Image (spheres, helix red, strand yellow):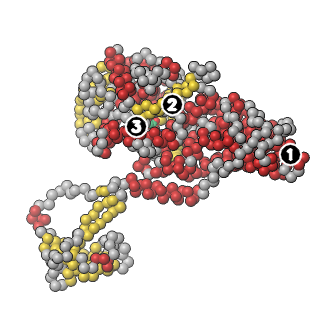
Amino acid sequence: MCEKCKGKYYITTPIYYPSAKLHIGHAYCTVATDTMARFKRLQGYDVMFLTGTDEHGQKIEDKAKEAGVTPQQFVDDIVTGEKGVLDLWKLMNISYDRFIRTTDDYHVAAIQKIFKKMYDNGDIYKGKYVGKYCKPCESFWTESQLVDGKCPDCGRECVDAEEEAYFFRLSKYADRVQDLLENTDFLEPRSRVSEMVNNFIKPGLEDLCVSRTSFTWGVPVDFDPGHVVYVWIDALFNYMTALGFENDKYDDLEKFWPADVHFIGKEIVRFHSIIWPAMLMSLNLPLPKKVYGHGWLLLDGGKMSKSKGNVVDPYVLSQRFGVDALRFFLLRTFPFGSDGNFSNELLINTINVDLANDLGNLVSRTVAMAQKYFGASLPQVQQGDEEKDAELLAMAGSLRSKYEEQMEKYAFQNALAEVFKVISRANKYIDENAPWVLAKSEENYPRLARVLYNLLETVRICGGLLSPFMPQTAEEIAKRLGGAAMDWDSLAVFGKLPADVATVAGPALFPRIDVEKELAELEKLHQEALKEAQPALEIAPYAQENVDFDTFCKNDFRAVKVKACVPVKKSDKLLQFTLDDGTGTDRQILSGIAKYYKPEDLVGKTLVAIVNLPPRKMMGRESCGMLLSAAHTEKGEEKLNLIMLDDAIPAGAKLC
Ligand code: MSP
């Protein structure tokens, strides 16, 4: 370890399922982890920040089949393709040190060794998986996974089934895991502990089925062909294989294991706080120091998904509001351990209030005044502190320790609240000292310089402490302060900014957003995206019931020629046709196709009508038959085409 380093710090995100493109909820955990990793680097730690993708399992196999590609091609596209996982993390400034894909050869080989080790030590054994099977989905379920006794995926009936499978002796570790959860700080927030103990451990921890034979896209059990390793075993060990456990690709295990913290979403706490430690216990390996189960970002109170349109698309949001604003919003608005309701309105208001008004204004006004009154740089000699300055100086000088205390607890929202208390105080300090009044008389210039210095120094400290959250903004603030230092030590002491600081002017850091206009624009984009997400082509399902031949033959289909076609008054649907049906008497048919055709375009066309339907009154007019059309849906929009015949076919010709 380097001499200057405070120590090592290993932090991870969950590895993502590349079964669909990621949404802002996925970015939430990664942004939080990145912020923590940057904070630890700022403090002087030697950090390892791991993220990656969890690429095996039936879901991926099914999705690939649907898309007509191999599972590997499918995941490659979502991970490395345009606007894929790697692109997204680059865009969002995610400073990971290592990226693992569970399809990487070294990981696959390591998982095979790990599985064999647990088999050899007797903690994995072969047995029979008895449960429920959904034939159309080819999925096994336990009784408790069923919803109303039916398949939780497709809602159809399941049948009793048995499958030969390997099991991990999870039950053997129940007491040790319970002790770990109840008597240590392993799992946080502490509120999640009772849920794990009461819902999963106390009712009796059953052995865990850890192999599958019903699909092939997984790590093969090398000593028993046909079995693939359960995806969660494969996934959880990523935290160690990425450091070199059971492989030669990396050599950081000794340095970084055990992990300082795994950040994960609340729904995967069970895997990380029960199954993961039990497996490590089985292999006599050190346990991670902490698992933190954060809350969820919800949309309209419900689960977030990409199919809800682009309101949750991190690309769209970053493009419109900027990456730093988005990162900031995620951690400023919601307490990390609880759920939070995402909305565009909340996002825009946070940007306007905190970033445009409070932070942005403080930086612009302070730099602009320094430039206006003193030009290139502040004068060297400044008078000492005054009582009027005491509060601001004390707040800015003690900010780092208050912020640090919150950050160490992963209380990002509280850490930011501390910074913004100081920013607000600084804005108030401007009004209290009214630099524009001081500037009226030359004898006040030393005081004016002091006021501006105090403000610039407050901006430096706040900017530095914001850097883990908003790295680009912090860099820009440092530039405006003439390349001011923002290292950890300097952020603890008020007065590290050189007295003759040379400021640099620039545009507003966060321009104010017109809420109404922006919301309307986002809604428009959202509707377009929803339309785009609709299937390209939809056709009506085929009739389930057969019609007997004689009944069908009773239909009398005839070629008819359009003599006249006019819209029906007071109806936006109906067109009234006057048709030559070959009988010598005009036939009138009303048809609800006004949305699709201009009446004048149809005159002279040869169409198909069913002519032996009983006459019907529509809008007070009689309709004797029906014109035939073909209907389908394209991108959610209904389309309709009248069946048109060759004009050489005479009116009245029977279709058979
Ligand atoms: N592949 C597993 C993790 C394996 S770790 C050994 C997985 N992947 S996931 O892609 O489905 O989810 C990744 C993370 O994103 C999870 O921690 C999950 O909680 C988080 N989120 C997904 N949607 C979310 C929100 N709407 N809000 C916050 N986090 C959410 O689980």
Residue drawn at the location 79% of the way across and 39% of the way down: 500
Residue 609 in view in this figure: no
Q: CA distance from mark 2 to mark 1?
A: 49 Å
Q: Where is 575 relative to 82, above or below?
A: below
Residue 22, label in figure? none
Residue 318: x percent and y percent? 53, 47
Q: Quadrant of ligand 1?
A: top left
Please tell me how crowded label 3 is: few (under 14), some (14-19), or many (20+) other residues with Cα within 10 Å: many
Q: On the image, numbered disc 3 is attached to which residue? A: 17
Residue 6: x percent and y percent? 62, 22
- Give the side of residue 24 with respect to residue 531, left or right: right
Q: CA distance from mark 1 to mark 3?
A: 61 Å
- Give the side of residue 387 with respect to residue 564, left or right: right
Residue drawn at the location 31% of the way across and 45% of the way down: 67
N-term mark: 2 or 1: 2
- Give the side of residue 194 with respect to residue 448, left or right: left
Q: Circle 2 — which element?
A: loop
Residue 204: x percent and y percent? 38, 24
Q: On the image, numbered disc 2 is attached to which residue? A: 97
Residue drawn at the location 19% of the way across and 55% of the way down: 544
Residue 445, label in figure? 1
Q: Circle 3 — which element?
A: loop
- Name which residue type carries label 2: Asp
Q: Circle 1 — which element?
A: helix
Q: Is disc 3's CB within 8 Å of ligand 1?
A: yes
N-term mark: 3 or 2: 3
